[in-house]
């Protein structure tokens, strides 16, 4: 799928002025956010103007991530697997799912098996840090019901990326899902890692994007 950077103008879907579409998108996003705040649900908000992604619980902001690049688009019309909804940028997207999913090792220590303290200070096992327990993939998707995938690319300003793990190698061998709508976010390795490890699955998603992500 070709996509248009959010900062570059592309041909619009209709004859409406870009300014009007931008205002309508912001108004629709605001309505969704008010409804989500009243319901107390977890949801993500992408602010394309300020390049920020935030996690909210109702009306309380829980976390904020900076995004260096935003690209958005939808597949060209004409294919049977390509529904063309003109107002896809104004939708409320539901049920976030990570791909690949987070896998965490669980270790249970039974009290009866705990040995007396070793006064020498030696330990048999040290719990790993967050980035060691759940390494940051080079790329992962947050998929939503209805055909939207938010692709997150972990890349620092100097071009460095996380070491390729088995999930990255496997993802390179498998064909990408043909999502009708895609938003691509480039974040630092640290920011992408915290998003991957802390995203509550099942969250909703609202995007406020400039009127530049139309037919690629």
Image (tube, helix red, strand yellow):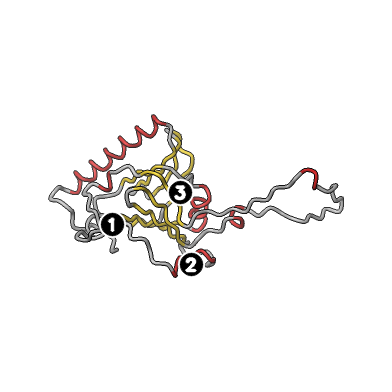
Q: Position of residue 199 (x, y in %)?
A: 48, 47
Q: Find the distance from the CA under tag 3 to the CA under tag 2.
A: 27 Å
Q: Nearer the viewer, mark 3 or mark 2?
A: 2
Where residue 4 sits, quadrant-wise, is bottom left
Q: Are marks 3 and 2 in contact (CB under 8 Å)?
A: no
Which mark is on residue 170?
2
Q: Find the distance from the CA under tag 1 to the CA under tag 2.
A: 25 Å
> Counting residues from the N terminus, which is met first, the one under dot 3 or under dot 1?
3
- Between 109 and 141, which is closer to the camera in this rendering? 109
Q: Secondary structure at mark 2?
A: helix
Where residue 37 sits, quadrant-wise, is top left
Left or right: 108 in relation to 189: right
Mark 3: few, some, or many residues within 10 Å (few <14, many ≥20)? some
Mark 1: few, some, or many residues within 10 Å (few <14, many ≥20)? many
Q: Secondary structure at mark 1?
A: strand
- Between 14 and 84, which is closer to the camera in this rendering? 84
Q: Residue farthest to the left?
A: 15
Quadrant, the C terminus: bottom left
Mark 2: few, some, or many residues within 10 Å (few <14, many ≥20)? few
Q: Are marks 1 and 2 in contact (CB under 8 Å)?
A: no
Residue at horizontal 77 percent and vertical 43 percent from the top: 111
Q: Nearer the viewer, mark 3 or mark 1?
A: 1
Question: Mark 1 — residue?
Answer: 73
Left or right: 122 in relation to 69: right
Which mark is on residue 65?
3
> Counting residues from the N terminus, which is met first, the one under dot 1 or under dot 2?
1
Q: Position of residue 188 (x, y in %)?
A: 47, 57
């Amino acid at each position: 799928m070709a996509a248009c950077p959010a900062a570059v103008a592309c041909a619009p879907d209709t004859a409406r002025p870009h300014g009007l579409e931008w205002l309508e998108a912001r108004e629709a996003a605001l309505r969704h956010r008010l409804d989500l705040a009243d319901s107390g649900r977890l949801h993500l908000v992408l602010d394309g103007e300020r390049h920020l992604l935030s996690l909210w619980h109702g009306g309380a902001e829980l976390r904020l991530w900076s995004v260096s690049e935003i690209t958005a688009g939808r597949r060209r019309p004409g294919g049977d697997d390509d529904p063309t909804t003109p107002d896809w940028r104004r939708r409320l997207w539901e049920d976030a799912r990570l791909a690949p999913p987070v896998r965490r090792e669980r270790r249970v220590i039974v009290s009866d098996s705990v040995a007396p303290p070793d006064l020498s200070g030696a330990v048999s096992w040290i719990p790993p840090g967050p980035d060691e327990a759940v390494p940051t993939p080079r790329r992962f998707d947050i998929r939503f019901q209805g055909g939207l995938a938010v692709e997150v690319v972990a890349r620092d300003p100097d071009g460095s990326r996380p070491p390729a793990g088995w999930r990255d190698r496997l993802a390179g061998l498998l064909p990408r899902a043909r999502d009708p709508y895609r938003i691509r976010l480039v974040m630092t390795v640290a920011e992408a890692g915290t998003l991957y490890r802390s995203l509550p699955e099942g969250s909703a998603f609202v995007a406020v994007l400039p009127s530049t992500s139309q037919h690629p």
